[in-house]
Amino acid sequence: MKKREPLSIGEIIGQFIAENKMGQKLDETQVMRLWPRIAGETANAYTQSMYVRNRILYVHLTSAVLRNELMLLRSELLRRFNDEFGHPVIDNIIFR
């Protein structure tokens, strides 16, 4: 039996995530956690719910005025999210 270099816990978890193809789902979960910081606390206060499906972030808002404002900022929000991860995580944001 050949001795191996010990792996750190982070390396073991990284291998597990890669082998089980869980990376995209973990990134999608992180997108929802980052929403208050990326969109702002005001937008977060009016956010009723959100979810990610097929790389599209769906955001349900309680304010029509804020919804229209965020629609104008959609491309900037997408850029911020994808810059945060260093690779494309979501392709579109739909505000409802």
Image (spheres, rainbow, N blue to C red):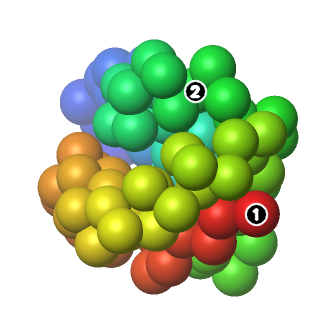
Label 1 crowd (10 A; few <14 / some 14-19 / many >=20)? some
Label 1 element class: loop
Mark 2, residue position: 44
Q: The C terminus lies in which quarter of the figure?
A: bottom right
Q: Nearer the viewer, residue 52 or 61?
A: 61
Mark 1, residue position: 96
The kind of residue on which mark 1 rests is: Arg
CA gap, disc 1 to disc 2? 14 Å
Label 2 element class: helix
Q: Nearer the viewer, residue 45 or 9?
A: 45
Q: The N terminus lies in which quarter of the figure?
A: top left
- Measured from the top left, where is residue 75 in percent x and y? 29, 72
Can residue 30 be seen in this snapshot? Answer: no
Compared to residue 49, the image places residue 54 above or below, namely below
Compared to residue 73, the image places residue 85 above or below, namely above
User: Are the residues flagged by discs 1 and 2 in contact, CB closer than 8 Å?
Assistant: no
Q: Residue at x 45, y 18 (%)?
A: 41
- Measured from the top left, where is residue 3 in percent x and y? 32, 34
Q: Residue at x 38, y 27 (%)?
A: 40
Q: Quadrant of residue 45?
A: top right
Label 2 crowd (10 A; few <14 / some 14-19 / many >=20)? some
Q: Is residue 30 left or right of residue 8?
A: right
For marks 1 and 2 on the same chain, the one whose residue lies earlier in the sequence:
2
Q: Nearer the viewer, residue 11 or 82?
A: 82
Q: Is residue 46 left or right of residue 86?
A: right
Can residue 6 be seen in this snapshot? Answer: yes
Q: Residue at x 24, y 30 (%)?
A: 5
Q: Residue at x 32, y 62 (%)?
A: 73
- Measured from the top left, where is residue 80 in percent x and y? 23, 52
Q: Is residue 22 left or right of residue 92?
A: right
The kind of residue on which mark 2 rests is: Asn
- Measured from the top left, where is residue 62 in percent x and y? 78, 39
